[in-house]
């Protein structure tokens, strides 16, 4: 078996790999549009080949200007393969060695997938293969959407939202908001990083997204104290909630609703028809806020990742 990245000349063969298992995959339309945008590249599409036939294919996704991919997007094994887990694990391991990194695998599935035999089986072998290749950690994120048919929320009558040009002010607000967070990724980062460095990395991450920096807001109470942050944003798929958070001393007063309303309104006033957001299944106050604000949980994002370095 030969494990290798692919080349432009074999595009037709790559388009012929079909995943028919009730989970997200790099279907031909997605493959072509992301190759065009630079989010997929042939160097990030790996195959396992035997006698000139593609027996497995893995497709990673990344920023068009990045040196290595951010996430594994699709894992396919030909139905004739006897040991799909072993082959897929081998393919991932070869690519990981070339990247000198183990990007997380993001799979989208419908709600209730655990009780549905088709997606459950599709996830089961991929999870084992990914685990063998070092992606041992599992996180379930709830995907929410708001569409323009829903009501546009009113502006808050108890928080004042202000623009702020200085990124360092956002860094300090992010640092405060991260204290006691229920968000898995932030908690994990804080095990190994200095809180200011972690906040700075987050702010830089939002800076690099296609959403406009001028949309970012800080929220203040009537007596001028910082209550939280609200960052409407966008990714390559369109408008997203981005980030919001309440400083610990103001939690439990429902300010999350005011911040989310501000983000929804900010997008809606620009004529946005759909806003997407993800939150960890374990971040219950955030999930409840989405539901109160008319966001619909339309899918699950399963994230399989390596143990964080340094833990
Ligand atoms: C998620 C978040 C914005 C909720 O803010 P909030 O305004 O306190 O939310 P609510 O007022 O609706 O809180 C509802 C309940 O959850 C509790 N709660 C809120 N955040 C909590 C936290 N981080 N840890 C434990 N409990 C929390 C509240 O105390 C309240 O409890 P009560 O019903 O017993 O009074 C806030 O936890 C936060 O800023 N977290 C860090 C950033 C974050 O996770 N952002 C979302 C990323 S997708």
Image (cartoon, grey):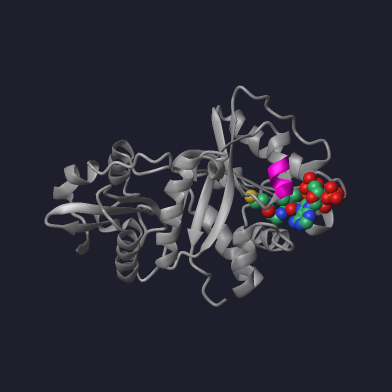
The residue that appears at 37% across and 43% down in the rendered structure is 25
* Residue 164 screen position, x and y as percent: 66, 51
Q: Residue at x 62, y 64 (%)?
A: 199
285 inside magenta stretch? yes
Residue placed farthest to the left in the image? 51
What residue span does the magenta drawing correspond to? 284-288
Q: Is residue 246 left or right of residue 263?
A: right
Which residue is at a point 17% across and 42% down the rendered structure image? 12
Q: Determine the residue positioned at 60% across, 58% down.
A: 167
Quadrant that contains the C terminus: bottom right
Which quadrant of the view contains residue 56?
A: bottom left
Q: In the rendered image of this protein, does residue 53 appear above or below residue 103?
A: above
Is residue 252 something that shows in the picture? no
Principal SS element in the magenta part?
Answer: helix
Total marks shown come to 0
Q: Which of the pair 247/133 is nearer the observer?
A: 133
Q: Residue furthest bottom?
A: 310
Q: Is residue 127 shown above or below 163? A: below
Left or right: 152 in relation to 300: right
Q: Quadrant of the N terminus?
A: bottom left
Front residue of 173 and 62: 62
- Position of 60 with respect to 237 (left or right) is left
User: Looking at the picture, how far across and down is residue 52, in whole percent?
Assistant: 12, 54
Residue placed furthest toward the top: 149
x, y percent for residue 104: 45, 59
């Amino acid at each position: 078996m030969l494990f290798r990245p692919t080349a432009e000349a074999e595009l037709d063969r790559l388009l012929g790999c079909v995943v028919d298992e009730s989970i997200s995959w790099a279907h031909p339309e997605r493959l072509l549009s992301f190759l065009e945008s630079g989010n997929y590249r042939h160097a990030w599409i790996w195959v396992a080949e035997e006698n000139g036939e593609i027996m497995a294919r893995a497709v990673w996704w990344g920023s068009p200007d990045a040196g290595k991919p951010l996430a594994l997007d699709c894992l396919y094994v030909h139905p004739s393969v006897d040991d799909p887990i072993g082959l897929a694990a081998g393919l991932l391991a070869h690519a990981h060695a070339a990247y000198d990194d183990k990007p997380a695998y993001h799979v989208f599935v419908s709600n209730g997938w655990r009780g549905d035999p088709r997606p459950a089986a599709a996830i089961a072998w991929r999870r084992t293969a990914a685990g063998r290749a070092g992606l041992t950690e599992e996180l379930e994120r709830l995907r929410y959407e708001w569409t323009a048919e829903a009501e546009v929320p009113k502006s808050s009558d108890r928080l004042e939202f202000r623009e702020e040009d200085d990124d360092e002010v956002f860094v300090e607000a992010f640092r405060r908001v991260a204290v006691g967070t229920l968000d898995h990724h932030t908690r994990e980062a804080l095990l190994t990083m200095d809180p200011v460095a972690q906040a700075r990395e987050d702010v830089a991450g939002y800076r690099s997204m296609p959403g406009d920096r001028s949309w970012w807001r800080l929220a203040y109470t009537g007596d001028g104290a910082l209550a939280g942050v609200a960052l409407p944003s966008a990714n390559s798929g369109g408008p997203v909630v981005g980030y919001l958070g309440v400083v610990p001393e103001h939690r439990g007063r429902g300010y999350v609703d005011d911040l989310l309303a501000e983000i929804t309104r900010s997008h809606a006033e620009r004529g946005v028809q759909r806003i997407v957001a993800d939150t960890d299944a374990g971040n219950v106050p955030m999930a409840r806020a989405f539901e109160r604000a008319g966001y619909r949980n339309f899918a699950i994002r399963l994230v399989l990742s390596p143990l964080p370095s340094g833990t």
